[in-house]
């Protein structure tokens, strides 16, 4: 959970797995094995003490049959790429990785209100 992330990393970039899914009705275009393509999406975030700031995602596609591993989605045929994107488009950062932005915004509002 998030508590584990807090204990491990107080400052720096971390990532958390948010999607791990096999693509249905799709074959690997290298080995032609059906439903062997797996998509993993990681949420990347910056930790500043106890405040996480989500900033990007990492996407990995692998084949469980031929052990292929890809990070560049552009090399896949359009039909396969569309199915990968259908999975990755639903991969959202967990809400708590935005806490840092929320805390900073509240702090800025308080500073502005106190200046008046």
Image (spheres, rainbow, N blue to C red):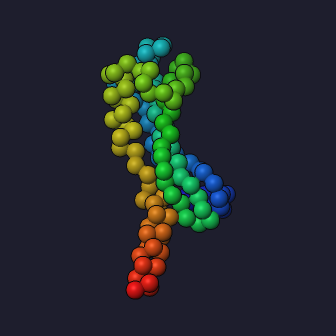
- Image coords of residue 32 (percent x, y): 43, 14
Residue 105, placed above or below residue 37: below
Is residue 81 rendered to the left or right of residue 67?
left
**Is residue 34 in view from this perspective?**
no
Q: Residue at x 51, y 33 (%)?
A: 60
Residue 66, placed above or below residue 53: above
- In the image, 98 versus 105, the foreground residue is 105
Question: Which residue is farthest top?
Answer: 31
- Quadrant containing the C terminus is bottom left
Q: Residue at x 49, y 54 (%)?
A: 54
- Image coords of residue 90 (percent x, y): 35, 43
- Quadrant containing the N terminus is bottom right
- Image coords of residue 7 (percent x, y): 66, 62
Question: Which residue is farthest front?
Answer: 116
**Is residue 30 in view from this perspective?**
yes
- Image coords of residue 72 (percent x, y): 48, 27
Q: Residue at x 63, y 54 (%)?
A: 12
- In the image, 82 versus 116, the foreground residue is 116
- In the image, 45 versus 3, the foreground residue is 45
């Amino acid at each position: 959970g998030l508590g584990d992330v807090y204990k491990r990393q107080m400052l720096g970039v971390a990532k958390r797995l948010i999607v791990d899914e096999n693509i249905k009705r799709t074959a690997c275009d290298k080995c032609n094995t059906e439903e062997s393509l797996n998509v993993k999406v990681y949420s990347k975030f910056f930790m500043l003490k106890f405040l996480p700031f989500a900033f990007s995602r990492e996407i990995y596609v692998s084949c469980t049959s031929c052990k292929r591993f890809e990070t560049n989605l552009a090399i896949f045929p359009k039909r396969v790429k569309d199915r990968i994107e259908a999975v990755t488009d639903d991969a959202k950062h967990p809400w708590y990785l935005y806490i840092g932005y929320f805390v900073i915004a509240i702090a800025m509002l308080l500073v502005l209100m106190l200046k008046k």
